[in-house]
Amino acid sequence: MDTVIGLDLTVQVVVLALAAVLAPLLVDRLERWVRLPSVVLEIVLGILIGPQVLGLVGTGALLETLSQLGMAMLFFLAGYEIDFRAVRGRPIALAGLGWAVSFALAAGALALAGAGAAVMIMAIGVCSTALGTTLPIARDAGLLAGPVGPHLMAVGAVGEFAPIALLALLYSEGQHSGRTTLAIALAGLAIAAAALGSLRRSERVSRLLSATLGTSAQLAVRLSMLVLLASVLLAAEIGVDIALGAFAAGVCMHVLLNALSEREEALVQSKLDGIGFGAVVPLFFVYTGVAFDLDALVSSPVALALIPVFLAAFALVRGAVTFAVAARALERAPRKALAAFAATELPIVVIAAGTAAERGLVAESVAAAMVGAAMLSVLIFPLVGLRWAGKDTAAVAATPV
């Protein structure tokens, strides 16, 4: 439901952007006391400027569209980040096994707790991993270059793709059935990846992509944006959440840009990160705070009590299971760090909780509690993971996220 705010819509967009700029500045100021991921302050600032506190920014069609664009870019970058050459074999197999066990445990526990018709969608949310949120933190801390890197990417990829695919299968709203929708999406991804992969041998494509990296043409970046928007449009048309289309687009673009040299591919990723994390992705997190139903949460003692319950569920269902499954693959310290990152959740929880509330499967207060727990997971678990990764990693992590 849209909220009516006295400020002009253009001013609201500026305030939204201002909050996105203030977040990393506040991170830098607070670093002497506590090191916070920028995304946490983006959400907090969104709550402050939102309709339930200062009332500077409301919810509406335009701001929702900007938020959806930011979310799409977040999932696109998550898909693009995955190096399938690094995660294939044991990392992806263990990640798949861990997610399946997590989902079975979550669904079983929720069924025993009497969640009723909400069992599946709540289990989907609880079993997710915020790959797009954790990867920048892990990369800045130097974790991806170590032994935990391939496993972190694999756990995040499965923990992000599998829940989105299940949401498409069970809760799609398009004209196709859920199974048809999922089949179309997966077939489209496979065909696109195969087609783009064949371009790897094209010298002309490689030359054009390379030659325009330093010019105003920027073919690689333009092509990335085209694939992203086309995938999001396709997903919307067939009734799949746009996150699935965006994730698939990122995977496809990573395959295509293998035609570039390693240095050039890193340059393209830097440009895409600049567009994503420098512009549109923060708008998604700030708007998540704006749209967060704080009143429903604080007015319900039961919902407040559910926050630590959900947080513990994230830690047990995703963290503890990941720790156990990776026992033979990693030493104890990196395995603990992997578990902490695996338990970090947010974007898919926002989607799943929102869908559940809209369909009347859970109360608004319960959905708010689930999202609130996911926000806390982003605040707590990556910091714990960096500490568990060791003193050297913690030293590298001293730069703000």
Image (tube, rainbow, N blue to C red):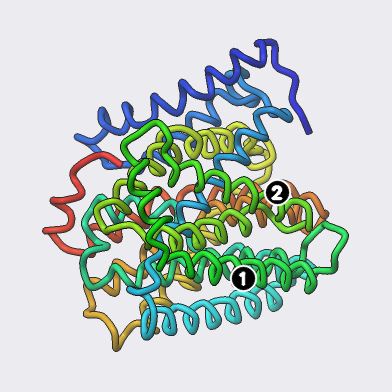
- The residue at 37%/79% (across/down) is 91
- For mark 1, give the secondary structure: helix
The answer to whether residue 242 is left or right of residue 226 is: right
Q: Is residue 130 in view from this perspective? A: no
The answer to whether residue 173 is left or right of residue 127 is: right
- For mark 2, give the secondary structure: helix
Looking at the figure, which quarter contains the N terminus? top right
Q: Please state which amino acid type lies under the numbered disc 2.
A: Leu
| Total numbered labels placed on residues in the image | 2
Decide: few, some or many residues near mark 2? Use Cα within 10 Å; few <14, some 14-19, many ≥20. some
Q: Marks 2/1: CA distance?
A: 17 Å
Residue sticking out furthest to the front: 204
The quadrant where residue 31 appears: top left
Image position of 35 with respect to 331: above or below: above
Mark 2 lies on residue: 233
Q: Earlier in the sequence, mark 2 or mark 1?
A: 1
Mark 1 lies on residue: 191
Looking at the figure, which quarter contains the C terminus? top left
Q: Nearer the viewer, residue 373 or 333?
A: 333
Query: Residue 371: horizontal and vertical position, in percent?
Result: 58, 50
Query: Residue 36: horizontal and vertical position, in percent?
Result: 33, 42
- The residue at 55%/81% (across/down) is 100
Q: Nearer the viewer, residue 199 or 31?
A: 199
- The residue at 51%/52% (across/down) is 76
Labelled pair 2, 1 in contact (Cβ < 8 Å):
no
Image position of 299 with respect to 233: above or below: above
Query: Residue 96: horizontal and vertical position, in percent?
Result: 49, 80
The answer to whether residue 237 is left or right of residue 401 is: right
- The residue at 69%/11% (across/down) is 6
Q: Is residue 331 in view from this perspective? A: yes
Of circles 2 and 1, which is in front?
A: 1
